[in-house]
Structure formats: C-alpha cells, structure tokens
Amino acid sequence: MLRDSNIDYALTDLTDRDVEEYYQGFANRVLWPICHYRLDLAEYGRREMAGYFRVNHFFASRLLPLIGEDDLIWIHDYHLIPLAAELRRQGVKNRIGFFLHIPWPAPDVFLAMPVNDEILTSLTAYDVLGFQTENDRENFADCLLRQGLGSRSDNTHFTVGARSFTARHYPIGIETEEFAKLAQRAAETSLHKRMLQSLDGKGLIIGVDRLDYSKGITQRIDAFENFLTRNPDSQRKVTLLQITPKSRSEVPEYEAMQRAVAEQAGRVNGALGTVDWVPIRYVNRSLRRPALAGLYRMAKLALVTPLRDGMNLVAKEFVAAQSEADPGVLLLSRFAGAAQELKDAVLVNPYDVEGTAEAVARSLAMPLEERRDRWKGMMKALRGNDVFSWCDTFLGDLSTGEQGAFENIV
Ligand code: ADQ
C-alpha cells in the first residue's frame, strides 16, 4: 500500500506473461485498435484473450479484501472491462461504475471481434456505464440490443435479466481555471524565453500527442507539408513543433510508427528546410505541465487531428491556455470526442489532407475578432464542464442512481 496525500494506492505485480498477454496483447492489440476503428491492426489470439480475463480475475481477488461495505467502486478504461463481473462472482454487492476513456465503435466494427458477447455481457455487471459522447453510448446500446443481450426502457436505462443499469455520456474535462493560471505564469520561465528567442519572430504551430496511430500524426504532417507547398509565402514564417512522447514501444505497430513519423518529419525538413529554418521540430519527450501550458499559450495554432479519439484533452488544454486578448486557433478533428463540445474550433476531417491544409491557411489568417469569438465560445464550454463537474456528476449518479446534468450538454 502506498500513500500519497489523501490517496492510498494498492499496487500489485504482474508476471511477464501477464503483461504480454493481457496488456500488450488483448488490451492494446485487440481492444484499442478495434475501439479506434482499426480492425486491420487487431491481432486477436485466444491466448491473449484468456490472459485478459485471467488478469482481471486476479485483480478482483486482490481488490476484494480492500472493499468496505459502503464503498462506491469506480473502474476506469478498457483494460478492466470484466473487473465488475469478476467482483460480482466473488460476492461483491456494492455499486460499481465504469468509465470508458476511448471510443465505443459502431456495431459492425465491434461485433467483428471474437468474444464480443463476453465483453458486452461483462459490462452489464456495472450499475453505471460512462462514455465520452452520446455517439459512443449509442454504439454500445446498438451492440447490446443487436446481440439480444438486454433491453432498453429509455435513452439511458437498460435491463438484462434481473439486473438494470444506466449508460450515459459524461464528457471528461480538465482543471480549466488551474490550467489557465499555469499558462499565464509560464511566460516567466526560462524555457519560455529560450523558445521565443529560438523562434526568432516565426509563428508557432503546435501538435502534442502520445505517439499513437489513432492520433493522425502522419496525415497532419502531410497536411502541413501540403500547406507549405501551396503557400510558399508562409515558408520561413511558421514552425510546427510536434511534441510526441513514445508510448507502448513493445507493441510492434507502435515501434513501426516511431520510425515512420521520424522519417516523414526528416523528409519534409530535408525537402523544404533552409540553413536557418526547420519547418518541423519533432520532439520525442514528455514535458512538465507548466512548460506545456506555456508552449500552448505561445502558439498561434494547435493541430489536434486524431483519426479517432475518445475525447482529447490536449484540445481542451490548448484552449484553456490562451490569452483572452490574443487567442490562438484550435484546429480540431471531427472524430475527436472534444469536437462535440468545442464547436467553435475549426473542425476538419483529418483524412482530407488538402482540406486540412486549407484550414491551416484559413486559421493562420483569421482576424482577431473571430479568434476571440471562437475562443470565448470554447472557454464557456470548458468552464461549464471541468474535470471536477465530470467527477461529481458520475459519482452522483453512481451513489444515488439518479441522473445529473450531462443529458443537457451537447
Ligand atoms: P490519451 O490518448 O493519452 O488519453 P489525451 O486526452 O490527449 O490522450 O491526453 C493526453 C494527456 O497527456 C494530456 O493531458 C496531455 O497534456 C498529456 N501529454 C501529451 N503529450 C505530452 C508531452 N509530450 N508531455 C507532457 N504531457 C503530455 C485517453 C484517450 C483520450 C481521452 C483521455 C482522457 O485516448 O481520448 O481524452 O484518455 O479520458
């Protein structure tokens, strides 16, 4: 047990085999690609599937002695879908909620996965199921009903045998006010000053994503190259800073992508760069939050162009970090959950490289008044739904069975 301020962490070890089958295997090579509409990348195997259920059973047995009679249990994300069913099997009667941070795909995609029935049935062991968007919830409901695994009495109430549960959308937020303050203070830091100096008057465009095929980084670099080629006047006037920490490097698709993106950025820099201008600065590191907040605030434009994303908190952080007097523009993929709330962003289809390139040009030329109007609209959404209200609404529903305010959002 580990204590950090008022949180106790209970940690447990996994064997190498567990990590390979459960985490790298079923969670990250089956569920992750399928939920992000990448059936082509799903590598299903019975061994990995068995590892996934085995490790969830193991987690349940480790958790069991820690659960108090009145505890609310809130389980997060796709690694742990069967955990409630395992706990129920071991006699747990507490209210249990689940929040899925990633998208739930359309039925034709989800139902292509072997063991889809087991995954769906596992979810019916929860009392409250949370999704990022209404679309995700509807996709889940369509899967459940199509498989004849339950019935629905209204938008959010479902019944399976003797059990009933609620499924709703709870769009996750950020610490809006804290992040805004962090960004304001960042101007004092030495990194901020060094960055301004190194830009030498050039406009900063920023992209911040874990290295993941769902984030559309390849298409984004193509779009930026297309923009520079079609707008030669902009060459030497802007720089794209793409900050991309490596993730899940043990999974082959991620390892291949690391090489592909580095080569692509190198090729664009080689083709278009000059002795004193590098079009793309490509950085494989994590930054501390204050540094990130300062860079967001310095940027004229953020490119947040995932091919599919549950929410995308980078989009929200970028907006919160802007100055009211002279805000930058958010260019956002329609396929990020955040697009349901941030309707004042410049919305793009990231598969349309030329369309995205045009949107980059439009965004960089956007008059101050329009930038401010759009920013105000987005800030209103972020203030109305920060991470604290997200948490309170979910836990309110979980503790009372009543519904909070999110049905009115969007
Ligand atoms: P992620 O796929 O990790 O999360 P995202 O929502 O963008 O995606 O969150 C990334 C977080 O990591 C942000 O807070 C960002 O600031 C931080 N981050 C990214 N790059 C960084 C860097 N180089 N240095 C430091 N910090 C960095 C999953 C889902 C999303 C969903 C979230 C939350 O895939 O769709 O929005 O969970 O539910």
Image (tube, grey):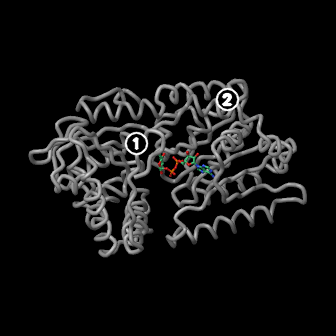
Q: Measuring from the top left, give residue 222's x and y in whole percent.
A: 66, 58
Horizontally, residue 409 falls left or right of residue 86, namely: right
Which of the marked residues, 2 or 1, is nearer the chain's N terminus? 1
Q: Residue at x 55, y 55 (%)?
A: 215
Q: CA distance from mark 2 to mark 1?
A: 27 Å
Q: Residue furthest left?
A: 162
Q: In the rendered view, would you say 3 is above or below 221?
A: above
Q: Number of numbered discs present?
A: 2
Q: Nearer the viewer, residue 79 or 269?
A: 79
Q: Nearer the viewer, residue 160 or 362?
A: 160
Q: Residue at x 32, y 59 (%)?
A: 110
Q: Measuring from the top left, give residue 184's x and y in whole percent.
A: 69, 30
**What secondary structure is marked by label 2?**
helix
Residue 95 figure quarter: top left
* Nearest to viewer (mark 2 / mark 1): 1
Q: Residue furthest right?
A: 275
Q: Measuring from the top left, give residue 89's x and y in whole percent.
A: 16, 56
Horizontally, residue 336 falls left or right of residue 392, namely: right
**What secondary structure is marked by label 1?**
loop
Q: Residue at x 24, y 43 (%)?
A: 68
Which amino acid does the dot numbered 1 rest on?
Answer: Gln
Horizontally, residue 196 falls left or right of residue 183, namely: right
In the rendered image, which residue does mark 1 sit on? 132
Residue 371's label in the rendered image is 2
Q: Is mark 1 within 8 Å of ligand 1?
A: yes
